[in-house]
Amino acid sequence: MNYRFERRYSGSIQAVIMDWAGTTVDFGSMAPVRAFQRLFRGEGIEVTLAECRAPMGSDKREHICQMLAMARIRDAWTQSKGSMPSEGDIDRLYQAFVQIQIECIRDSAVLIPGMAEVATTLTERGIRLGANTGYSRDMIVELVQRAAEQGYSPEVVITASDVRRGRPWPEMSLQAAIALEATAMHACVKVDDTGVGIEEGLNAGMWTVAVAVSGNEVGLSLEDWQALATDEQRRLRDRAHARLAATGAHYVVDSIAELPVVISDIEARLARGERP
């Protein structure tokens, strides 16, 4: 006779793992876009905001590869350089990108409104905080310091250069959960502003929360967002929510400020025997 036992975790949330740009800092995820535009401009190629944002969430070398694979950029490169981009070109671009990105991060290392309060609230509830990112380790040194000065200091930070495979592979989230001593992936929440970041969390077996307005999908600085008419804000918000919901995210919110309410709802679902 076969017996089937299904194990369910029904406790509280133990760990929350959050992305950086567009999720906890840098409203609109502006630093990566500015960096990629500067990088390609240095090669004599102007790239659009949409082209920069399409691979967002990937590790930055892969991001460069995906941009170079876009037909318009590939054709512009070939016309300018006389040949298709090579692995050597990609390596050179990535090395140049690192310093440009560090400079752009420095200019955008401001917490998204409500983030410091969220960090305090979750910590007081006994939830441990981790972070991961498509940035490499050397890109985020100053960012981590600046965030701490503003009231957010995650216990664990995992970067794309710390793992063999970045998003959408679950390695960064799993490594963070282990370091935060989570006993079950169902007790963990992944928060991100990109589809590939949500996919990472889903692949890790975690609850996922997508942030729509503050991140890559709307793609506007806080000042530009606040300057929009209400109808235009609603249009952009609805579009961003729909796109992120289509990634399979369990929740879609405007910004990180809404996270404590979401955590409470997840804990109620866990208590009822639900799981991601």
Image (tube, rainbow, N blue to C red):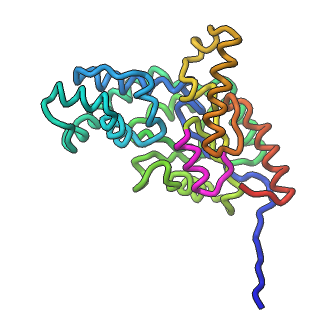
x then y, percent, for residue 52: 41, 28
Residue 16 visible at all: no
The answer to whether residue 60 is left or right of residue 133 is left
The answer to whether residue 45 is left or right of residue 249 is left
Given residues 72 and 8, the one toward you in this image is: 72
Give the main secondary structure, helix, strand or loop, of the magenta stretch: helix
The answer to whether residue 242 is above or below residue 205 is: above
The single residue placed furthest to the bottom in the displayed view is 1
Q: Identify the image quadrant of the C terminus.
A: bottom right
Q: Toward which corner of the image does residue 18 lie, by quadrant?
A: top right
Q: Residue at x 77, y 91 (%)?
A: 1
Given residues 111 and 257, the one toward you in this image is: 257
Q: Residue at x 69, y 28 (%)?
A: 254
User: Number of callouts in the render?
Assistant: 0
Residue 133 visible at all: yes
x then y, percent, for residue 153: 59, 38
The answer to whether residue 173 is above or below residue 260 is: below
Magenta-tinted stretch = 195-208
Q: Is 199 a magenta residue?
A: yes
Q: Is 114 a magenta residue?
A: no
The answer to whether residue 238 is left or right of residue 4 is left
Q: Toward which corner of the image does residue 251 lie, by quadrant?
A: top right
x then y, percent, for residue 267: 81, 50
Q: Residue at x 86, y 57 (%)?
A: 272
x then y, percent, for residue 206: 65, 53
The single residue placed furthest to the left in the displayed view is 82
